Image (cartoon, rainbow, N blue to C red):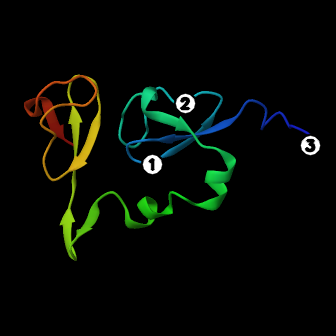
């Protein structure tokens, strides 16, 4: 297999918060969608990318979740300190990254 200049060193990265993908040698500094830092990206392996194992989240979307047949609109909450983004009807009690309280989250 010949590696072209375009493919050399390029990897696919997926945001662990919103699922957005990025192609590059390194993950982006910030997610273009939910604004979390590069530490929230994981490398996508070719088998996962081709098999569509993560298709459930992408098809359902992050904004609508079915609980017992009822649709609940979910909100995004961003930590003002570290940028972590939480998806839910309310902010978390504590940020799982920097441990600040719910009062330090803003709806995005």
Q: Can you name the residue that lies furthest to the right here?
A: 1
Whichever of labels 1 and 3 marks the residue nearer the N terminus, that label is 3
The residue nearer to you, when weighing 94 against 29, is: 94
Work out how far the residue at label 1 is from the one at label 2, CA to CA, in angstroms: 13 Å
Residue that appears at 15% across and 53% down = 89
Q: Can you name the residue that lies furthest to the left here?
A: 103
Where residue 93 sits: x, y (%)? 12, 36
Secondary structure of residue under mark 1: loop
Where residue 53 sits: x, y (%)? 55, 59
Q: Is residue 26 above or below residue 65?
A: above
Whichever of labels 1 and 2 marks the residue nearer the N terminus, that label is 1
Residue that appears at 47% across and 47% down = 20
Quarter of the image where the N terminus is located? top right
Whichever of labels 2 and 3 marks the residue nearer the N terminus, that label is 3
| Residue named by callout 1 | 19
Circle on res. 27: 2
Hey, which quadrant is residue 43 in on the image?
A: top right
Circle on res. 77: none
| Residue named by callout 3 | 1
Residues at marks 1 and 2 touching, judged by CB atoms closer than 8 Å: no
Where residue 29 sits: x, y (%)? 47, 26
Quarter of the image where the C terminus is located? top left
Q: Mark 2 against mark 3, which lies toward the viewer?
A: 3
Q: Is residue 92 above or below residue 19?
A: above
For label 2, the crowd category at 10 Å Cα-Cα, with few meaning under 14, some 14 to 19 and many 20 or more, is many
Where residue 31 sits: x, y (%)? 43, 36
Work out how far the residue at label 2 is from the one at label 3, CA to CA, in angstroms: 25 Å
Answer left or right for 35 relative to 11: left
Residue that appears at 74% across and 29% down = 9
Residues at marks 2 and 3 touching, judged by CB atoms closer than 8 Å: no
Secondary structure of residue under mark 3: loop
Residue that appears at 70% across and 34% down = 10
């Amino acid at each position: 297999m010949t590696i072209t200049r375009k493919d050399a060193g390029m990897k696919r990265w997926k945001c662990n918060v919103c699922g957005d993908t990025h192609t590059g040698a390194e993950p982006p500094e910030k997610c273009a969608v939910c604004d979390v830092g590069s530490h929230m990206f994981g490398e996508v392996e070719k088998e996962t990318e081709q098999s569509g194992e993560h298709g459930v989240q992408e098809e359902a979307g992050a904004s609508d979740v079915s609980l017992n047949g009822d649709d609940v609109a979910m909100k995004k909450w961003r930590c003002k300190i570290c940028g972590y983004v939480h998806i839910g009807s309310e902010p978390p009690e504590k940020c799982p990254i920097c441990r600040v309280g719910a009062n330090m989250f803003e709806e995005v």
